[in-house]
Amino acid sequence: MIHSFLLIGQSNMAGRGFIEEAIPVDNSNIKILRNGRWVKMFRPINPDRKMSGVSLAESFAEKYAEKHGVDVGLICCADGGTHIEQWQKGSILYDNALSQIKLAARTSTIAGILWHQGEGDCSEELCYAYEKRFLQFLDDFRSDSGTENIPFIIGGLGDFLPDCSLSDSLKNYTIINDTFKNICKKKHLVAFVDATGLTANPDLLHFNAKSLYEFGLRYFEAYEKIADGIMLEEKENSDSERTKMEEL
Amino acid sequence: MIHSFLLIGQSNMAGRGFIEEAIPVDNSNIKILRNGRWVKMFRPINPDRKMSGVSLAESFAEKYAEKHGVDVGLICCADGGTHIEQWQKGSILYDNALSQIKLAARTSTIAGILWHQGEGDCSEELCYAYEKRFLQFLDDFRSDSGTENIPFIIGGLGDFLPDCSLSDSLKNYTIINDTFKNICKKKHLVAFVDATGLTANPDLLHFNAKSLYEFGLRYFEAYEKIADGIMLEEKENSDSERTKMEEL
């Protein structure tokens, strides 16, 4: 059985780590979706742009496969430079991700969604509208893909962003991160992964290969914590049902 | 405006030409579909496997863009090692290609479908069933994608195949090629592109980069011949309507 994960968001989810700096990952149990079918993982896993490289999902998948003794499938639909507005229901990115997760679900068990995005929404104009737009996307996508009861893991924006020369607005990354933390309090099975201390490529925009490896481990830790919660809930529900049955 | 082409079939459509042997192609007007969106072409355009490389669609697109003065979009959905049975209506490959051509149609004009497949159906058991299966696929896919009036270009199998050590059955490649020629006689706007004289990688299975460049030019020539036919038909229809109008 393959346990699969949808990867969505912008460039730091697609992965821009330099392949020559990649920390080796055992890919013998990692697969990627190509044309709806599973093939053995090769880099770059999310070839949205010429500069695509190492992804945080690689170490995530390695650890998941190791711990759970299953094959891990990665459904790579992240797209560089995108804003949350471009991920709303009915958009091209939304419909593409939806079609791919549905194809993957024919031959795997969807086990989670990994999200990293927000750099594109750091401007004063956009960052305060982010929560509403993100929640709309989250609710719509979970409902349309039938993943309401599956963990949705959100990575934080890197604390190197204020030093990036691309845009002054990136200093607002903390507003986006605070938004994510707030969303986790409101929403079931949504977890935040802290990016504090992770480092970047010379562009000071994209996580480097070494940090993406570390970030993948943090995503895995956050996922396991939430997934333990699911199993606990299932146990509690079944305990409570048993008690009810015994009471009859 | 982008004129777009769907690429489907198996490895020789995905492209296995060695990138270091690639003939340079001007990609300034060539785009590839990624996550439903158009990005500037980069290699490999159809990353279905680790060994993906140069594709015949590159020189095809270069010539088309040059002649028609438009941007060309490539929707790359070919998948290595596949049989015609795996392309039937409702299959994963079929549904993936259908979802991608529909996404592409939101932001481009679908101008053609390029097919190369058949090596996987050369066995005695499969080759005589190929025509029926191919026609079923063709009719279903054209109907479901609304491409009944758009050229469908089929490339022939390479005449180096009998020397390939992978399988004895590849000597039956001529039966598949004859089937294609037969189909062209029966079906509207379907053309066959001869692969005679083209050469292979050392595996004697995959066209090499130089031959893929040449093959793309032959596909373009076949496309133009058919597309001229469409314009002629339109002219004839409009001439005949004018005559009718004048007769009233």
Image (cartoon, coloured by chain):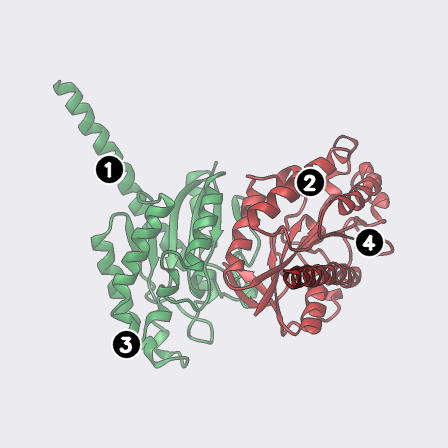
Chain colours: A red, B green
Find out whether the residues at labels 2 and 4 contact each other: C-beta distance under 8 Å.
no
Residue at the spot of label 1: B233
**Kind of residue at badge 1:** Glu
Find out whether the residues at labels 3 and 4 contact each other: C-beta distance under 8 Å.
no
Check the residue under mark 1 and report the chain it is in. B
Check the residue under mark 4 and report the chain it is in. A
Of the residues tagged 3 and 2, which is closer to the observer?
2
At x 38%, y 80%, the residue is B167
Near mark 3 (Cα within 10 A), the count class, few <14, some 14-19 or many ≥20, is few
Q: CA distance from mark 2 to mark 1?
A: 52 Å
Find out whether the residues at labels 2 and 1 contact each other: C-beta distance under 8 Å.
no
Near mark 4 (Cα within 10 A), the count class, few <14, some 14-19 or many ≥20, is many
Q: From the viewer's perspective, is residue A147 above or below residue B149?
A: below
State the SS at label 2: helix
Check the residue under mark 3 and report the chain it is in. B
Residue at the spot of label 4: A195
Res. B213 visible in picture: no
Near mark 2 (Cα within 10 A), the count class, few <14, some 14-19 or many ≥20, is some
At x 35%, y 44%, the residue is B147
**Kind of residue at badge 3:** Glu
At x 45%, y 47%, the residue is B101
Q: CA distance from mark 4 to mark 1?
A: 61 Å
Give the percent coordinates (x, y) of residue B139.
Answer: 29, 52
**Kind of residue at badge 2:** Leu
Residue at the spot of label 3: B124
Q: CA distance from mark 2 to mark 4?
A: 21 Å
**Kind of residue at badge 4:** Ala
